[in-house]
């Protein structure tokens, strides 16, 4: 399991509470918005949980310069991985090659660290989304995430379609609209390596 | 009171912030909008290159959003995005404050990030600052708006109006509250759920100097019906 920020504009107190809850739950990774990378890293200390910085998420519509600046700062703040939202408008406009080319500077920045690419399956539909995922792999993605938290819900069909398209080698995180860990099993069976569950799906206080 | 159609259109930021809209869809949106003479078209950053050729030679300005829709970036990233957009001849920037910090009441964060973007958005370019009133505690709306003004906002905007956030529509009382707290020189843009002429007029009466709407064309057409005495023009 991974944690995924599904709270609308959380305060720092809410983020602290969520990060600690995710730590207790033993998630493998935790995705955070760009300004929260440093605080999350500080909270987690030497924990092996990977801090994943969201880049150009959720819409994938940022300018090239700001996307790169965002990634640079996130890495300097201690991000272990980057999760970049591809530009879905370019993909829907028949410009997948340009959307993939935009990943190049981020691939270089994240040298030696995991570059994830968010492929907007729910927005693009399974077939075009799977094409985007295959393009992202060609562009250097180490891992594919199905959706940003604004695309819509991940489905078994999306996961299976991407898995067929990119093969077994690439890790695949089912993300988007998963509100509880109990929803994970069918997605894992369909070929997801992990499932990203919204922060609000984890209890914020320890069980007594 | 709005007297002429030109005056009405001059109040409207005709808006398309649809995630994943194709270049063709945005070009069609711009082409359809141009004859109405709106004050500006408001788009996401990645659509600026599509819109500029359509708008060149018209009186319509291009507005682009920064850190949309949640504003959860560091100020350096927001300033960079604004600078990139100004390099592309965008006339107006609609930036979102860090909505999490605003909810905490971290007013110095808000003022500083607005000031950083203001540096990248030199006059006469306009800087509109979105404070997402629907998710702020009531007692913080005024202070956050004042912090945005202190940072250099030309207009304070009530909400992103972004439907995927599932937040309520902007209300006339939001606008009245901003009007009571901001200096007369600072404009107010009402946005979020303004879908018809009656709602637009309510916002303007409350003090809005600009209105964001994805249905600007329908609103102007409603005005035309009213002027023609057609009862469909409410």
Image: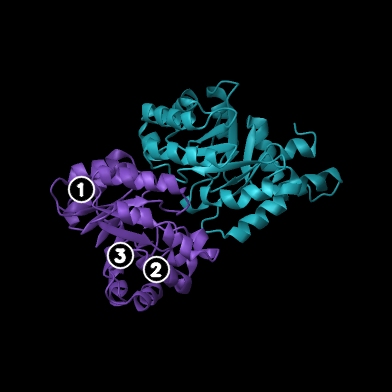
Chain colours: A purple, B cyan
Residue B200 relative to residue A93: left or right: right
The chain containing the residue under callout 1 comes to A
Q: Residue furthest bottom?
A: A164
Mark 1 surroundings within 10 Å by alpha-carbon count, few (fewer than 14), some (14 through 19), many (20 or more): some
Q: Residues within 10 Å of mark 3 (few under 14, many from 20)?
A: many
Q: In the rendered structure, find residue A133 and report the number of the disc placed on it.
A: 2
Question: B231 or B227, which is in the foreground?
Answer: B227
* Residue B72: quarter of image: top left
Q: Which residue is mark 3?
A: A143
Q: Secondary structure at mark 2?
A: helix
Give the CA distance from mark 1 to mark 2.
32 Å
Residue B97 spot, x, y in % from top left? 44, 36
Q: Is residue B215 visible?
A: no
Name the secondary structure under disc 1.
Answer: helix
Q: Quadrant of the N terminus of chain B?
A: top right
User: Foreground residue, A208 or A27?
Assistant: A27
Which residue is at 33% across, 40% downward?
A11
Read off the chain for label 2. A
A1 over B43 or under it: above or below: below
Is residue B16 left or right of A63 when viewed as pictured?
right
Chain designation of label 3:
A
Mark found first going from the N terminus, 1 or 2:
1
Q: Are marks 1 and 2 in contact (CB under 8 Å)?
A: no
- From what the image shows, is residue B73 above or below residue A169? above
Return the mark for residue A20.
1
Mark 3 or mark 2: which comes first in sequence? 2
Query: In the rendered view, does A203 fall on the left or right side of B61?
Result: left
Q: Position of residue B152 (x, y in %)?
A: 50, 26
């Amino acid at each position: 399991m991974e944690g995924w920020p599904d709270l609308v504009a959380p305060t720092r107190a809410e983020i602290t509470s969520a990060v600690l809850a995710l730590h207790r739950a033993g998630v493998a990774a935790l995705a955070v918005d760009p300004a929260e990378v440093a605080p999350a890293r500080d909270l987690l200390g030497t924990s092996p949980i990977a801090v994943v910085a969201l880049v150009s998420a959720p819409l994938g519509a940022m300018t090239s310069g700001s996307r790169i600046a965002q990634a640079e700062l996130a890495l300097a703040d201690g991000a272990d991985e980057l999760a970049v939202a591809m530009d879905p408008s370019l993909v829907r406009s028949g410009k997948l090659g340009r959307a993939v080319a935009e990943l190049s500077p981020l691939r270089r920045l994240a040298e030696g660290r995991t570059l994830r690419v968010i492929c907007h399956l729910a927005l693009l539909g399974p077939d075009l989304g799977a094409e985007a995922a295959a393009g992202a792999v060609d562009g250097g993605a180490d891992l594919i995430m199905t959706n940003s938290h604004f695309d819509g819900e991940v489905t078994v069909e999306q996961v299976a379609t991407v898995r067929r398209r990119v093969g077994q080698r690439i890790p695949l995180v089912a993300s988007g609209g998963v509100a509880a860990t109990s929803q994970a099993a069918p997605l894992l069976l369909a070929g997801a390596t992990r499932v990203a569950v919204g922060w609000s799906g984890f209890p914020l206080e320890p069980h007594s | 009171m709005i007297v002429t159609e030109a005056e009405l259109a001059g109040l409207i930021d005709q808006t398309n912030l649809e995630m994943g809209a194709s270049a063709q869809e945005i070009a069609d949106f711009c082409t359809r909008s141009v004859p109405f003479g709106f004050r500006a078209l408001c788009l996401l950053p990645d659509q600026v290159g599509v819109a500029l050729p359509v708008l060149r030679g018209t009186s319509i300005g291009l507005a682009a959003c920064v850190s949309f829709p949640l504003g959860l970036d560091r100020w350096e990233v927001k300033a960079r995005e604004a600078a990139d957009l100004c390099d592309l001849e965008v006339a107006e920037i609609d930036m979102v404050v860090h909505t999490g910090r605003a909810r905490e009441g971290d007013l110095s964060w808000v003022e500083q990030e607005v000031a950083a973007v203001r540096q990248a958005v030199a006059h006469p370019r306009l800087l509109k600052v979105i404070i997402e009133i629907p998710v702020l505690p009531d007692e913080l709306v005024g202070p956050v708006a004042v912090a945005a003004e202190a940072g250099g906002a030309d207009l304070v905007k009530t909400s992103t109006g972004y439907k995927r956030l599932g937040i309520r529509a902007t209300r006339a009382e939001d606008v009245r509250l901003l009007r009571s707290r901001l200096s007369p020189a600072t404009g107010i843009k009402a946005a979020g759920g303004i879908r018809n002429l009656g709602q637009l007029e309510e916002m303007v009466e409350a003090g809005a100097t600009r209105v964001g709407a994805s249905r600007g064309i329908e609103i102007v057409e409603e005005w035309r019906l009213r002027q023609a005495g057609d009862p469909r023009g409410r």
